Amino acid sequence: MTDGFRSPSDDPIMILLEWLADAAEHDAIQYAGAATLATVDGDGADARIVLVHEVDGRGLLFGTDTRSPKAHQLRLHPSAALTFYWSPLERQIRIRGTVELADEAAAEKTFDDRPRGSRITAWACQQSREVSDRRVLEGRFAQAEGRFDAGHPVPRPDTWRAYRLVPESLEFWTAQRFRLHDRQAFQKEPNGRWRRFTLEP
């Protein structure tokens, strides 16, 4: 069990960056930037794990295929929630906000951060589309792999873009004895400042 929430900062982005750094340094956490992204459309709510590539004062950056369900849902309803959970640290961060399409440079960053094989998959597949057989996918991957020389980078397809979640609220949670957990929340005020307050477990 981790120590209680003790950060004196009134800037939740700075705390988020500190917690991400702690997670990245922990041997038992493979992907510190992995988070659950929740979206909604006319059929209801949806959620999946995404990799957050960058965090700064503008928000949290992630990438996806523009033909994917989440991209479609974000076009319809450009707001979402992100949740980080690091079990070895017994810490969680919940974030809600609006989502905007990021620029081309951000799209390049999220694509270049992917391993080479994952970049080739982005060329071979349309995310979440129904396919008749896995062998079809493997055949398309082999074809896409043959298009790119091993010694050269795999370029970003036009269908790959980056999105930025701009936080409106954040909650930092740490586990405590008897489930008397620490929950520190931040809400952005109309003047752009953050209001910090404590929530009951």
Image (spheres, grey):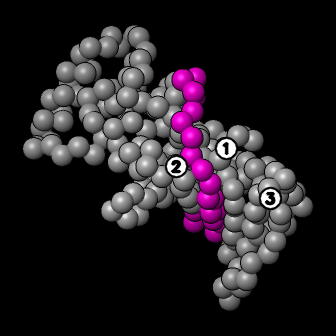
Q: Residue at x 80, y 59 (%)?
A: 189
| First in residue order: circle 1 vs circle 3 | 1
Could you say whether the residue bearing mark 2 is in a helix, strand or loop? Answer: loop
Q: Examine the rendering and report whether any part of residue 11 can be seen.
A: no
Location of residue 189 with respect to 5 vertically, above or below: above
Q: Which residue is mark 2?
A: 78
Give yes or no for residue 161 being in the magenta stretch. no
Q: Which x, y percent locates residue 69?
A: 35, 48
Amino acid type at circle 2 is Pro
Question: Residue 121 appears at what percent x and percent y?
Answer: 31, 31
Residue 195, given in percent of the width and then of the height, sits at: 83, 63
Left or right placement of residue 170 versus residue 70 in this view: right
C-alpha separation, residue under disc 2 versus residue under disc 3: 20 Å
The mark nearer the N terminus, 2 or 3, is 2
Q: Find numbered disc 3 in the image and state the secondary structure of the residue it sits on.
A: loop
User: For mark 1, does the 10 Å Cα neighbourhood hold few (<14), some (14 to 19), or many (20 or more) residues?
Assistant: some
Magenta residues, as a range? 84-106
Separation (CA) of disc 1 from disc 3: 16 Å
Q: Which residue occupies 46% across, 57% down?
A: 39
Vertical side of 195 occupied by 150: above or below: above
As drawn, 32 above or below 139: below
> Label 3 crowding class (10 Å Cα cut-off): few <14, some 14-19, many 20+?
few
* Residue topped by disc 3: 189
Q: Is residue 1 left or right of residue 129?
A: right
Question: Where is mark 1, residue-wise?
Answer: 59
Discs 1, 2 touching: Cβ within 8 Å? no
